[in-house]
Image (cartoon, rainbow, N blue to C red):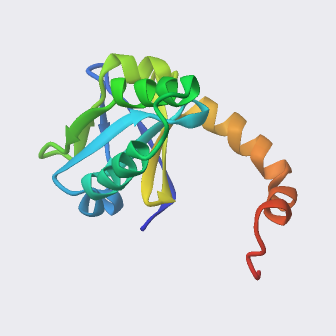
Amino acid sequence: MFMGEFRHSIDSKGRLIMPAKFRENLGEQFVVTRGLDRCLFVYPRTEWSVLEEKIKTLPMTKKDVRAFVRTLFSGATECEVDKQGRINLPNNLLEYAKIEKDVVIIGVSTRVEIWSASEWESYSAEAADSFDEIAEQIVDLGI
């Protein structure tokens, strides 16, 4: 399981230090792709395979499904961590997520998300304001 929030900077070559806490669970090779809310999703190979299987069950006759699948897979790239604990993110993904320098990396259960620090600040401030309402609407967490 991935959890926690880490702040790092991306270098001029598009390299980002992946938190040591996440590296072991991601494995030697993992997948980075466009995520929702203008962040990047990072999946261990096993979780990517689970997602692929779910996508195969979607009706490709629906325009929205085709658009989602194209966007998800066309942005996907295999990554691996170098000896310094860095991953190299391609420009198309950096542009999609509006990442320039400062980055927030968060654990979200079965995946990792990479955010532009400014986008994360905006998103988390907005989400914090409605956290209680959202929790009441979607599930009884028993908290």
Seen at 34% across and 58% down, the residue is: 22
Quarter-of-image position of residue 34: top left
Name the side, left or right, on which 3 lies relative to 90. Answer: right
Between residue 81 and residue 52, name the one nearer to us: 52
Quarter-of-image position of residue 16: top left
Q: Position of residue 116 (x, y in %)?
A: 53, 31
Farthest residue, direction bottom: 142
Q: Position of residue 29 (x, y in %)?
A: 18, 48
Q: Position of residue 84 (x, y in %)?
A: 17, 45
Compared to 69, does 113 lie above or below?
Answer: below
Farthest residue, direction front: 61
Between residue 122 and residue 64, name the one nearer to us: 64
Q: Does any portion of residue 50 appear in the rendered image?
A: yes
Between residue 87 and residue 111, name the one nearer to us: 111
Seen at 34% across and 62% down, the residue is: 21
Q: Position of residue 76 (x, y in %)?
A: 32, 31
Q: Does any portion of residue 97 appear in the rendered image?
A: no
Seen at 16% across and 53% down, the residue is: 28
Between residue 6 and residue 109, name the one nearer to us: 109
Name the side, left or right, on which 131 lies relative to 25. Answer: right
Q: State the quadrant of the C terminus.
A: bottom right
Farthest residue, direction left: 83
Label total for image:
0
Seen at 55% across and 28% down, the residue is: 62
Q: State the quadrant of the N terminus.
A: bottom left
Name the side, left or right, on which 124 lies relative to 95. Answer: right
